[in-house]
Amino acid sequence: MTTKKTRITDLLGIEYPIIQGGMAWIAEHTLAAAVTNAGGLGLIAGGSAPIDYLREQIRLTKAAVGGKPFGVNIMLMSPNAEELAQLVIDEGVPVVTTGAGNPGKYMAAWKEAGIKVIPVIPSVGLAKRMERAGADAVVAEGTESGGHIGENTTMCLVPQVVDALEIPVIAAGGIADGRGIAASLMLGAEGVQVGTRFLASEECQIHPTYKELVVKAKDTDSVVTGRSTGHPCRNVKTRFSKKLASGEMNGSITPDEFEELTLGSLRKAVKDGNLEEGSFLCGAIAGMVNDIKPAKEIIEEMFAQAEELLSK
Ligand code: TUI
């Protein structure tokens, strides 16, 4: 069995069936280009960045990948989603992934423009809706993921989504080595989306404090905040994230106060490494990420390990 050729590699025209997570504030052109040039699909995160900045990121990535495919992730709760939905068409972006909402209203225009559309979904119901709306594939993202999460786990969600859909499924949440790839393929997925492992890549331009937190994290070092607001987010455990989570739980922080405390907190983590007020989003697999290396090495090692496991 080969881990490398699936409907996802055919669909996207890539060598390895791996796509990079569209991590808001984090996934910019150096990381996206490194993942694409290593044979995966690199992504630029739209987040809530200004459109002119994102146009520049798209052009820088395009210039660095020499015709190889890359994508843009559109966070649908963001105020710039509408504008970004048009920008990807205007700039000829080949692939779009979406998160934190239903991209249905943009689907026709993206398909018309020849864009491959891959919504990230946390449930079977949403996956089915996305297939009916014309999605080319979906990312089934388990609650092990970093950032904004659903309730179901990767192990439970992926096979149920695979059974419910005809289009290919990409597994996400808790995948950081070849064992995770092999397991995902066994669950019926035809590719993986990886975020946390790439936080500790050389090309990822987050603050050194952020990388250090990920590399030093143990298995129990992630915590979910934002449950009280209806937007749960998985973070590295810090004094700040622990204070938020316990304050939400015992009612000493109201949902409005939570929103106020976390406004701009991702930027404070990524740009400033601010441990007092920053939200260091990361997946539950951070405990297994112990070193910083080039994205190309990460990808090649993951697939070599998966290949070896599956050939046994
Ligand atoms: O979107 C993500 N991960 C993210 S987005 C983000 S930025 C953010 N900041 C503050 C609050 C919320 C987000 C950081 N991490 N992953 C994909 C994902 N999509 N997870 C869950 C969903 C999702 C949730 C509801 C997708 C669709 C959905 O649909 C609801 C509907 O409209 O039916």
Image (cartoon, rainbow, N blue to C red):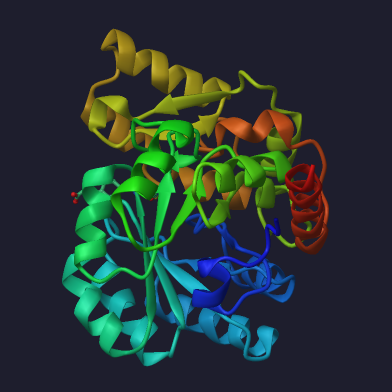
The mark total stands at 0
Q: Is residue 13 left or right of residue 95?
A: right
Q: Is residue 285 left or right of residue 189?
A: right
Q: Is residue 68 left or right of residue 55?
A: right
Residue at the image position 66 percent from the left and 73 percent from the top: 36
Task: Reply above or below: 162 against 256.
Answer: below
Is 92 or 130 nearer to us in this picture? Answer: 130
Residue at the image position 32 percent from the left and 90 percent from the top: 113
Is 140 or 74 nearer to us in this picture? Answer: 140
Is 126 or 250 nearer to us in this picture? Answer: 126
Percent from the top left, x then y, of residue 186? Answer: 57, 43
Report if residue 101 is visible in the image: no
Is 119 or 43 nearer to us in this picture? Answer: 119
Percent from the top left, x then y, of residue 312? Answer: 79, 42
Residue at the image position 43 percent from the left and 81 percent from the top: 52
Percent from the top left, x then y, of residue 122? Answer: 33, 43
